[in-house]
Image (cartoon, rainbow, N blue to C red):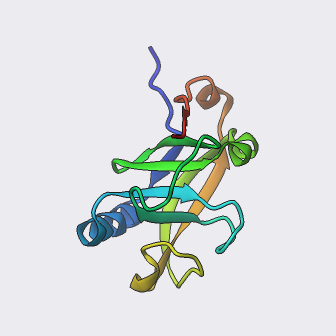
Amino acid sequence: MPEPVARVEITDAARAMLSRLEQQHGPLMFHQSGGCCDGSSPMCYPRGEFRVGGSDVQIGEVAGTPFYMSSRQFEYWKHTHLTVDVVPGRGSGFSVEAPEGVRFLIRSRLFTDDEADRLLPVVPGA
């Protein structure tokens, strides 16, 4: 049986920052911004601080951290593989990495036909 394909992954640099932030803030979560505050950047919050609702879907996990976006936004991005990365600079949102002088961002590409056939399912929000 072919290996399932994750919809979202994380770079080593972003994984290291996420680990550092978890030491400071405890368990975290990502929610892909739909254009408010910092364009369309992934926002990182202490788990439970950002309320996920029925209009959100969990598209996967990165380094054990759930990654959500709105179901409406997912309809546009469902054919897109996302990679969470981190770069120097300060975003304008409320994401927990902002005081560190870095910001998370998304690198994206379309899934191949083969990958699309093996995608992991999304999970409805709370």
Q: Is residue 41 above or below residue 9?
A: below
**Where residue 105 appears, x then y in whole percent?**
56, 66
The residue drawn where x is 61% and y is 66% is 41
**Where residue 45 appears, x then y in whole percent?**
44, 64
In the displayed orientation, state which residue is furthest to the left: 23
Q: How many discs appear?
A: 0
**In this picture, residue 58 sits left or right of residue 16:** right
Q: Is residue 116 above or below residue 96?
A: above
The residue drawn where x is 63% and y is 54% is 108
Quarter-wise, where is residue 80 in the image? Answer: top right
Q: Is residue 94 above or below residue 9?
A: below
Q: Nearer the viewer, residue 18 or 48?
A: 48
In the displayed orientation, state which residue is furthest to the top: 1
**Where residue 10 appears, x then y in whole percent?**
44, 55
The residue drawn where x is 58% and y is 61% is 106
The residue drawn where x is 59% and y is 30% is 115
**In this picture, residue 51 sits left or right of residue 75:** left
**Where residue 3 appears, x then y in whole percent?**
44, 25
Q: Nearer the viewer, residue 98 or 7?
A: 98
Quarter-wise, where is residue 13 in the image? Answer: bottom left
Query: Where's the N terminus, which quadrant?
Result: top left
Quarter-wise, where is residue 16 in the image? Answer: bottom left
Q: Is residue 89 above or below residue 82?
A: below
